[in-house]
Image (tube, helix red, strand yellow):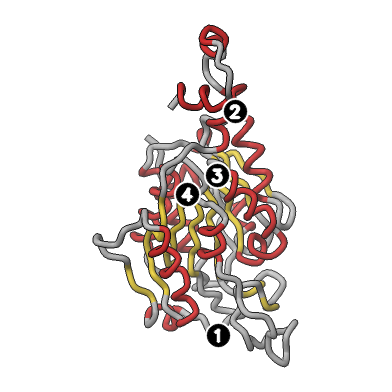
Amino acid sequence: MSNIQDFSGYNPTWCPGCGNWGIGVALKKALVELGYSPDQVVIVFGIGCSGNMNDFVNAYAIHSLHGRAIPNAIGAKLANHKMPVIAVVGDGDCYGEGGNHLIHACRGNHDIKVLVHDNRVYGLTTGQSAPTSPKGFKSKSTPLGLIEAPINPLALALTQGASFIAQSFAGDLIHLTNTIKKAISHKGFSLVNVLQPCVTFNKINTYEYYLKRIYKLDEKYEKENFNEALKKSLEANQEKFPLGIIYQSERLAYHQQISQLFDDISLINKNKFDKIEDIINYFK
């Protein structure tokens, strides 16, 4: 049985109080509680403060190029589809440079788990505005205020076909750990958007800011309901942030529909299937 120390690498160099600390601990706790050891997991890291976790978490890992964590994760999953693959990225990394990869990973329902550090700023490059920064946000790159409206990652993932969409808060270790565990256990594309205060460069979206605006979805919430999920995702426009599984549906992941990856390809030949749909139905 593994423990958190097994998954621990070098000591983190994040700023004291940064939300990354909570995310790092939650990820390691989730992997331990699911019974994984470092040699049973692939983690692909993006660039930025979140990407620095590449040095702080012990597992099979790739430190990818900016915005390219998702395609690397997809490649790893197709190469070894029995191993869980996690992409650890930032909001600028995933929703900015990597936005196109996010869209196509959602529509393909690739069985990867995308854990986004959403601090609404470019932290490692010292405080430029990010895709999730609010309109009017003043930063080094937007001294007069940001012109664009912020991207809505939950609504984007939902409308492009993601089968698991969740949101959590870096200041709630128990909730975040459980959410990550559910995402890893889901078969299909999983997005976990983590509201993560940047204590150094974002003085607006602080711990206090989120504590006044977050709330947890109750047991009556129907996470299978697409329309309800869309309503919840749009609450960000009113600065309300639901925590929990926003949407979840059960359907075949991308790799489950590739005949070359079936365990016993001879079964296909014996049954002489005429259509790929017949193969899919046979292996359900």
* Pointers 4 and 3 in contact (C-beta within 8 Å): yes
In three-dimensional space, the C-alpha distance between marks 2 and 4, rounded to whole angstroms, equals 18 Å
Label 2 belongs to which residue? 258
Within 10 angstroms of label 4, few (less than 14), some, or many (20 or more) residues? many
Front-lying residue, 259 or 16: 259
In three-dimensional space, the C-alpha distance between marks 4 and 3, rounded to whole angstroms, equals 7 Å
Label 2's element? loop
Q: Nearer the viewer, mark 2 or mark 1?
A: 2
Within 10 angstroms of label 2, few (less than 14), some, or many (20 or more) residues? few
Q: Amino acid at mark 4?
A: Ser
What mark, if any, has residue 109 been given in the picture?
3
Q: State which tag comes first along the sequence, 3 or 2.
A: 3
In three-dimensional space, the C-alpha distance between marks 1 and 3, rounded to whole angstroms, equals 36 Å
Depicted 269 relative to depicted 74: above or below: above
Q: Amino acid at mark 3?
A: Asn
Label 1 belongs to which residue? 203
Within 10 angstroms of label 1, few (less than 14), some, or many (20 or more) residues? few
* Pointers 3 and 2 in contact (C-beta within 8 Å): no
Residue at the spot 34% in from the left edge and 73% down from the top edge: 215
Label 4 belongs to which residue? 163
Depicted 152 relative to depicted 58: above or below: below
In three-dimensional space, the C-alpha distance between marks 4 and 1, rounded to whole angstroms, equals 33 Å
Q: State which tag comes first along the sequence, 4 or 1.
A: 4
Q: Position of residue 267 (x, y in %)?
A: 51, 11
Label 1's element? loop
Label 3's element? loop
Residue at the spot 44% in from the left edge and 49% down from the top edge: 183
